[in-house]
Image: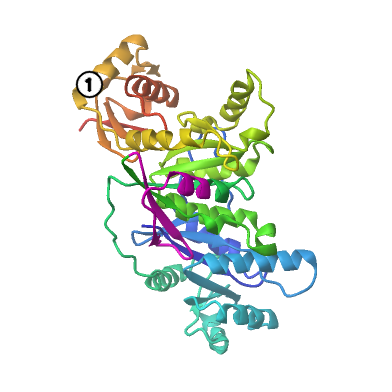
Amino acid sequence: MRSSVVAIVGRPNVGKSTIFNRLVGERISIVEDIPGVTRDRIYAKAEWLNTTFRLIDTGGIEIGDEPLLIQMREQAEVAIREADVIIFLANGREGITAADEEVAKILYKSNKPIVLAINKVDNPEMREQIYEFYALGFGEPHPISGTHGLGLGDLLDSVVNQFPERENVPVDEDVIHFSVIGRPNVGKSSLVNTIVNEDRVIVSDIAGTTRDAIDTSFSKDDRDFVIIDTAGMRKRGKIYETTEKYSILRALKAIERSDVVLTLIDAETGIIEQDKKIAGYAHEAGRAVVIVVNKWDTIKQHDKAIKEFEDNVRAHFQFLDYAPIVYLSAETKKRVHTLLPKVVQASENHTKRVETNVLNDVIMDALAINPAPSKHGKKLKVLYATQVAVKPPTFVVFVNDPDLMHFSYQRFLENQIREAFGFEGTPIKIYARKRS
């Protein structure tokens, strides 16, 4: 089930970024301190009353012909199209302006739920000034103060109440759901078409849970798959040429519904920062990952070609050191047959369970190889470990003091577990807990 999306929209200088930071606050999802994982602060995960959602901060909608103003407006319109609910933010100190009315006209056309928020209402005496905002036609205005954090609870109550109901559709655990993500023009569409057309035995269209998405089911070698359409990431005219960063929003929706994520790289143009951003979200979501190097036929082939490219990939994607790499050409279909076996392997490892007694044998052997460290004269004691979850495989290691578990030693234990049980293609999580 995907998270709902909320966009904060308004003209410039009404406090959108301040409200964004207030609403996200300490609830922003934590990014692992691993080189290569980067985030764009244009959107973040937020939570209110046990409901999580994705919040988008947009550039202000400004009316004008200057290239920068046009781009700001286009970016905001993309966010509006992606959102389930829109917070229309205005400035209570300045009253309704012509720019506010222009923004309102844009929002009327969206047919989305609109929650009107009036910022910079810093004291009760100013509340009478908000009544003029009823003229915008979006119902009751919510007085708030981004600076002081006033009124945000009532605002979030209204926002969450507008979220669309999500049906809990039964998921067949035997069917592998996977998506193809990547920046524009790396060959996502070609790869999807090649996979479906080449490997299909039974193909049918299933209405997806995200707008404008159609999932395709097919079978190959007695395994059933659903490929999640990521057409939403493709550029649509000039808007998407100038708002590439919003393609990640579409990637997030696909990632949330996937067991395995194929992260596509263009062999011809090489790796850029956007590739790492997109792949980082698959890693943070705990999904299994296969790195796919497309357009491999454009690379001059020699004995060390794969080794050299792999070294480059591993250097840039240190946080995906567990992900296998597949080299292929979607256009010529060369080596495409090597992809689905890696998808199956990654999916199986993503759901793999390890017996507790076998796991503890591995942990004890690891302790013998590399004894637990000491800190301030106190030695870490590892008592036992157990697996508590799958998708991704998650382990709890019970110790005398979790503060003594250094990140480097935790990574050592992870490497020992991987060496013993495989887990290629899937992240694994390890938590240190004090035995109660």
Residue 304 is inside the magenta segment: no
> Does the magenta run of residues contain 213?
yes
Question: x%, y% of residue 354?
Answer: 25, 28
Q: Which segment did they paint magenta?
A: 192-221
Q: Based on the displayed image, in which of its 4 quarters is residue 302 positioned? A: top right
35 lies above or below 106 = above
Residue 240, position as x, y percentages in the image: 65, 60
Residue 206 at x, y percent in the picture: 38, 60
What x and y, as percent, mark residue 88?
A: 55, 74
The quarter of the image holding the C terminus is: top left
Residue 43 visible here: no
Q: Nearer the viewer, residue 307 or 133?
A: 307
Seen from this angle, which residue lies furthest top? 369
At a point 56% along the width and 82% down the height, the residue shown is: 108
Amino acid type shown at disc 1:
Val
Name the element at disc 1.
helix
Q: Looking at the image, which is closer to me, 3 or 287?
A: 287
Residue positioned 50% across, 35% down in the render: 33
Image-based side of 206 in relation to 31, left or right: left
Residue toward you, 214 or 249: 214
**Quadrant for the N terminus in the image:** bottom left
Label 1 packing within 10 angstroms: few (<14), some (14-19), many (20+): few
Query: Which residue in the protein does label 1 denote?
Result: 358
The answer to whether residue 84 is visible is yes
In the rendered view, tell whether residue 181 sits above or below residue 113.
Answer: above
